[in-house]
Amino acid sequence: MKRSEGTLEVIKSGFYGSIQDLGRFGYAHWGIPAAGAMDEQSYLLANHLLQNAPNDACLELTLIGGEFQFHHPTTIVITGAPVNIQVNGQTYPINHVIDIKAGELLRLSPVKKGCRIYLGIYGGFQTEEVLGSKSWYAGITQNTKLEKGMSLPYQSVPQKRTAPHAKVAMDDALFEDEVLEVYRGAEAAEMDEQRFEQLLAGEFYLSAKQNRMGIQLEEKFENSLSEILTAPVYPGTVQLTPGGKLMILMKDAQVTGGYPRILQLSPQAISCLSQKKQGDKVRFTLIDEW
């Protein structure tokens, strides 16, 4: 099939959007975070439905969708948090592959539940690749946040694809489940076992202090642990601050930290947490073995 370069114009950018793939790896020794899609599960679903490569870049949108005009024909899919999807006034369901004609306008409403939306496009967005990844990150890529008037390149498909279009039912567990699966963190062994059990039995609410770097929980948890020497941290690491706040690191987090690492979220739990917003409740459940 013949391909040429197409462009998506950002008419309304929404609250916060960025280009993301699976992330940037192998540069932690330079202090460069992994970045990548916050909800990896929904991101991978978008590429799967489009028959893309798993690492093809998608547009990640937070809370508010936006409006986008396609200047060349292509094929898209919307996954992640449920939203109203309209292309030139015609409504489509989420997780449904849609053929786009040149000039058509995509409108995405604010989320109905959840937090993050993924706009996947055939062949992935053809934005700049830096250090093996297209994921936007301040100081690494030229762009860091979606802005009105931006043009995002993609591979134009000048005719309707002949492959059958798939759609899948939404997995509500990603948005409804309050339980986050975790492993014991590196400093968990220094906690009194009774206190550790209290941590697992507790209920916590997401605070307003959250972004792609990390999410702070509202409740304080008594901290009797000493700060540690700077040590590696990863997306999903749960740190306990001297003031007793629980901070869960996310995809844009730093690569080292000096607070005790008491838990580590599973990849599935990171996806689940990324679909939570301020005021949502979470609990931890321990996975016994690494």
Image (spheres, rainbow, N blue to C red):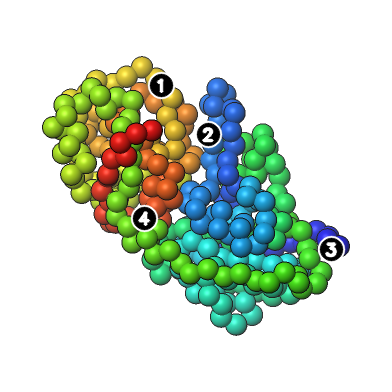
Q: Which label was assigned to residue 276?
A: 4
Position of residue 251 measured from the top left corner of the image (x, y, whole percent)? 48, 41
Q: Is residue 12 visible?
A: no
Q: Which of marks 3 and 2 is nearer the N terminus?
A: 3
Real-space Cα separation, disc 2 to disc 4, in angstroms:
22 Å
Position of residue 104 measured from the top left corner of the image (x, y, whole percent)? 69, 75
Q: Name the residue under label 1.
A: 231
Q: Mark 3 points at which residue?
A: 1
Position of residue 181 measured from the top left corner of the image (x, y, whole percent)? 33, 44
Q: Is residue 203 left or right of residue 212?
A: left
Residue occupying the far bottom of the picture: 89
What residue type is disc 3 on? Answer: Met
Q: Which of marks 2 and 4 is nearer the N terminus?
A: 2
Q: Earlier in the sequence, mark 1 or mark 3?
A: 3
Quadrant in the picture for the N terminus: bottom right
Q: Mark 2 points at which residue?
A: 33
